[in-house]
Image: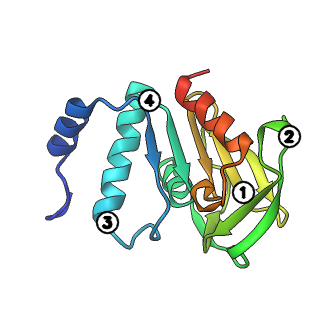
Amino acid sequence: MATGHPSEQTLESWLQAIQPSALILSGGNDIGEYPARDDTERYLLSWAETKRVPVLGICRGLQMMAVWAGANLIRIDGHVGSRHQLAVPARKDEWPTEVNSYHNWGLASCPDGFEVAARAEDGSIEAIKHVELPWEGWMWHPEREASFSIQDIKRLKRLFSGK
């Protein structure tokens, strides 16, 4: 890691000290803007993979999960400050029907080891789920809603409880 970035030893010591039972990779800046954040999140994902720790990626967090797994990002239009319907291939009752959107980047394709869980009306990927690990990524921001959707609450509880 470059100077100013947390070392792997520092991150490992921190993880051993707090022993997280789950991780949330939050939204925020674009990947590449802050290399220290990118490196830290890559390390956290590798650690979570080894320990089989549940991970939820929100917007940028989903993007980091995908990039970590080898996928590419593409510029996407019409997804900043908008709302759209979700197209969900299975178990529609487990997902919100409409979500907010605040991102300029989307996935070029679903990363290896993941499956598409939901798409936007334009066909872009809105949610992914790992096929083996307890990991999900959502492109929307549940924390930016006036109240949390019951589907998001149930999915989060199920993901973090390992059920």
Horizontal and vertical percent for residue 137?
A: 60, 47
Residue at x 54%, y 58% (from the top left corner): 63
Front: mark 2 or 4: 2
> Which residue matches tag 2?
92
Reading the chain from its start, which is encountered first: label 1 or label 4? 4
Cα–Cα span, label 2 and label 4:
26 Å
Report how far apart the C-alphas of labels 3 and 1 lie in the structure.
25 Å
Q: Which mark is residue 35?
A: 3
Residue linked to disc 4: 53
Q: Where, by quadrant of the figure, is residue 129 drawn?
A: top right
Pick whichever of labels 2 and 4 is earlier in the sequence: 4
Q: Secondary structure at mark 2?
A: helix
Pointer 2 and pointer 4: residues touching (CB < 8 Å)? no
Local crowd size for mark 2, using a 10 Å CA cut-off: few (<14), some (14–19), many (≥20) = some
Split into 4 quadrants, where in the image is the C terminus? top right
Quarter location, residue 78: bottom right
The residue at which mark 1 appears reads as 125
Instruction: Work out which quarter of the rendered image holds the N terminus and state it.
Output: bottom left
Q: Amino acid at mark 3?
A: Pro
